[in-house]
Amino acid sequence: MTPRRKVAPAELRAALLAVGPWLKDPELPKPSRAELGAAVKMSARTLEQIVPGSSVEVRVPPFVAVQCIEGPRHTRGTPPNVVETDVRTWLLMVTGLLEFHDASADGRVDASGSRASEIAHWLPLLRLTP
């Protein structure tokens, strides 16, 4: 597998700032699919870069699935530790506008496995002020 290009902090910041107004006010027009995809992919891949490993899989359909956090390697079938959520919830957590534990408690995040909640330690990646 070809290694992914590293996400530059400035690229991540630009992608998240582009969707920031909508994250803060859902009544605003939804960003384009390309803008949402860029923000989701860059943020998930940044998490993958700063917390390398393969014990937790983070899924944000339809855009990305990455593995992170050191531990036992998973290679087939459904991983034992999975975090899955929708685009908006992911971006809210990545920007600090929503806490992982709150999103998990109210069902916006499906976190399965004993290590899934460890990603909360690494969020937010870039804090946007409300």
Image (cartoon, rainbow, N blue to C red):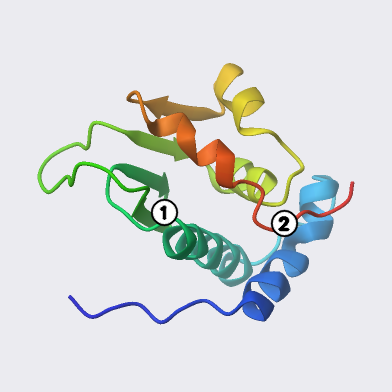
Q: Residue at x 32, y 48 (%)?
A: 70
Frontmost of labels 1 and 2 is 1
Q: Amino acid at mark 1?
A: Pro
How many C-alpha atoms fall within 10 Å of the one at disc 2: few (<14), some, or many (≥20)? some
Answer with the quarter of the image where residue 13 lies. Answer: bottom right
Q: Residue 75: horizontal and vertical position, in percent?
A: 12, 49
Q: Nearer the viewer, residue 82 or 30?
A: 82
Asked which secondary structure carries label 2, the reply is loop
Q: Residue at x 65, y 43 (%)?
A: 93
Relative placement, left or right, of 122 versus 2 is right
How many C-alpha atoms fall within 10 Å of the one at disc 1: few (<14), some, or many (≥20)? few
Q: Residue 62: horizontal and vertical position, in percent?
A: 41, 54
Asked which secondary structure carries label 1, the reply is loop
Q: Residue at x 71, y 58 (%)?
A: 126
| Name of the residue lying farthest toward the top | 105
Label 1 belongs to which residue? 62
Q: Nearer the viewer, residue 67 or 22?
A: 67
Q: Residue 43: horizontal and vertical position, in percent?
A: 55, 61
Figure quadrant of the N terminus: bottom left
Label 2 belongs to which residue? 30
Q: Amino acid at mark 2?
A: Lys
Report how far apart the C-alphas of labels 1 and 2 lie in the structure: 16 Å
Q: Nearer the viewer, residue 49 or 30?
A: 49
Tell me which numbered mark, 1 or 2, is placed earlier along the sequence. 2
Up/down of 87 relative to 103, above or below: below
Q: Which mark is residue 118?
A: none
